[in-house]
Amino acid sequence: MIFVYRTAGDKLVCPEVIEKDCWINLVNPTEAELRRVSQVTGLDYDFLKYPLDDEEIPRVEVEEDQSMIIIHAPVICDDDIIYDTIPLGMVTNDDFIVTVCLQDLDLLEEFTGSRIKGIATFKKTRFIFHTLNRKTTLFLKYLRDINRRTEKIESDLTYSMRNKELLSLLNLQKSLVYFSTSLRYNAKVMNRLLRGKTVKMYEEDVDLLEDVIVENSQAIEMAEIYSNISKSTMDAFASMISNNLSVTMKLLTAITIMLAIPTMIAGIWGMNVDLPFQNAGLLGFGMLMLFMGLICLLAFLILKKRDMF
């Protein structure tokens, strides 16, 4: 899909045709749409196609009068892995800026809703840096959400040891790994933008990019902290489960021993040979039951002393 926007005053409007200083947002475009945009804008077709590879790593490429910046943006998934990252490409030349992604991102909602002041499609460098800033803000938002989910799962695991909670915690831990890796790649891209001459920058642009780098570093630290907490939680609950299993097996072993004693005595007195109390009638039965009870009590005290109960 192709979405075209252009700054008119302090708002973003949708022109009927692609014209100079437009922002073109490509969401999971077809081959025909990519070729059309490439022909109209003069941007390299491969630059427009690279971000559609979900395994593409963040990087910067410059060719003649155009540049391509690929970063990783956070997304919420519908499958068991709640959070993931996908490539977001920003391809620019002197006349156009094109963003390319496999799916529609919350990353760009504020731009299309005109809720960020200072956004103008003809200020391409500023637009790119605001996109980076919005991306980093989303990472921070999702990281805080992951932390809240982790705390809730920990609370649930206090009263339940079901696999469902453990799998949910594992999925959040995977999400943190994806976030941490993507944030580090993004940091390399932003540092290269700050050091190099990939895009034309003014003093205000440099200040904005430095702020984004600081926030990205904060997101990296948060991802690492939450990941370590998640790993520690998983290890702790794994140890608890193992300990609970040992306690249960120990209790079952003690109960088995307790049941084996009267069973053995009853088996011996059931033999077809001469045995004590066999002619004593009810008195013999009572004495035998008392003997069995004393033996079981003795076994219970011994097992209790050994902390089997």
Image: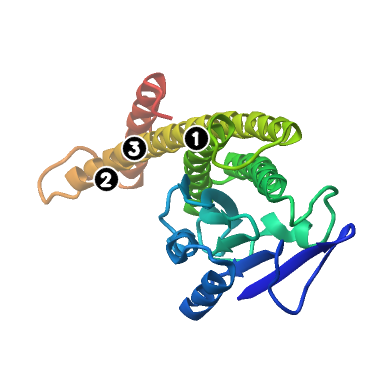
Mark 2 Cα shell of 10 Å, populated few (<14), some (14-19), many (≥20)? few
Identified by mark 2, the residue type is: Thr
Identified by mark 3, the residue type is: Met
Q: In this view, which residue lies farthest toward the left? A: 273
Mark 3 Cα shell of 10 Å, populated few (<14), some (14-19), many (≥20)? some
Query: Where on the picture, by quarter, is residue 55?
Result: bottom left
- In this view, the mark in front (1 or 3): 1
Q: Position of residue 65 (x, y in %)?
A: 53, 52
Q: Exactly how many numbered labels are in the figure?
A: 3
Mark 1 Cα shell of 10 Å, populated few (<14), some (14-19), many (≥20)? some
In this picture, residue 49 sits left or right of residue 98: left
Query: Where on the picture, by quarter, is residue 223?
Result: top right
Label placed on residue 258: 3
Which mark sits nearer the N-terminus, 2 or 3? Answer: 3
Residue 157 at least partly seen: yes
Identified by mark 1, the residue type is: Lys
Which mark sits nearer the N-terminus, 2 or 1? Answer: 1
From the viewer's side, name the closer residue of 237 and 70. Answer: 70
Query: Where on the picture, by quarter, is residue 295?
Result: top left
The reply to whether discs 2 and 1 touch (Cβ–Cβ < 8 Å) is no
Q: Position of residue 137 (x, y in %)?
A: 70, 43
Mark 2 and mark 3: span between their CA atoms? Answer: 9 Å
Which mark sits nearer the N-terminus, 1 or 3? Answer: 1
Name the residue at 35% across, 39% down: 249
| Residue matched to label 2 | 263
The quarter in which the C terminus is drawn is top left
| Residue matched to label 1 | 188
Mark 1 and mark 3: span between their CA atoms? Answer: 66 Å
From the viewer's side, name the closer residue of 28 and 230. Answer: 28
- In this view, the mark in front (2 or 1): 1
Determine whether the residue tagged by mark 1 lies in a helix, strand or loop: helix
Residue 82 at least partly seen: no
